[in-house]
Amino acid sequence: MALPILMPRFDPDETPGTVLAWHVAVGDEVAEGDPVADVECEKTVLELEAYAPGRVLAIVVAAGEAAYPHTILGILGTRGEPIDDLLAQAERERAAAPAPPHGNGKPRGG
């Protein structure tokens, strides 16, 4: 079953964060605990780790883009696994979100 990589919640105000860098690319295999991305919010940088083994099936929010907490940043799963539902969910999140107050100003999830 495909699993989303989510933007963490940094504070109770649901402040958006920015993806600083991806340490993986689509198609890469990861083990549980492997670093997958660096995200920043309010001058705090957090290294996101894979919480399950699998293959990176999609990167939804590119480095440099902002996203609200609980937004799908990427998708892990197995090769050939259908991810259309998660991609559609990510698109709905982006469409419903207001523009973040920082980052590059592109609305990305919510």
Image (cartoon, grey):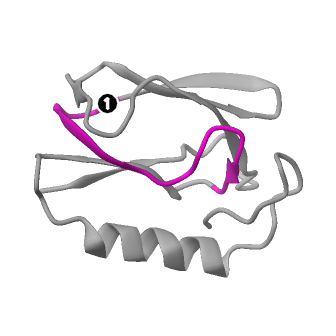
Question: Compared with residue 95, is residue 78 higher up or lower down, i.e. above or below?
Answer: above
Question: Compared with residue 45, is residue 104 higher up or lower down, i.e. above or below?
Answer: below
- Residue at image position (54%, 47%) is 7
Other residues around mark 1 within 10 Å, as few (<14) / some (14–19) / many (≥20)? some
Q: Where is residue 2 in the image (x, y as percent from the top left)?
A: 20, 55
Q: Position of residue 102 (x, y in %)?
A: 87, 48
**Of the pair 84 and 93, the residue shown nearer to us:** 84
User: Is 9 situated left or right of 75 in this image?
Assistant: right
Task: Give the magenta part as a residue range.
Answer: 50-68
Image quadrant for the N terminus?
A: bottom left
User: Is 77 situated left or right of 18 in this image?
Assistant: left
- Residue at image position (32%, 19%) is 34
Question: Compared with residue 31, is residue 74 higher up or lower down, i.e. above or below?
Answer: below
The residue type indicated by label 1 comes to Ala
Q: Where is residue 23 in the image (x, y as percent from the top left)?
A: 46, 23
- Residue 53 in magenta? yes
Question: Compared with residue 12, is residue 49 higher up or lower down, i.e. above or below?
Answer: above
- Residue 84 in magenta? no
Q: Among all residues in the image, which is located at the extreme right? A: 101
- Residue at image position (65%, 57%) is 68
Question: In what element is the residue under mark 1?
Answer: loop
Q: Let me know if residue 11 appears in the view.
A: no
User: Is 60 situated left or right of 26 in this image?
Assistant: right
Q: Let me know if residue 65 appears in the view.
A: yes
Circle 1 residue:
50
Q: Position of residue 109 (x, y in %)?
A: 61, 65
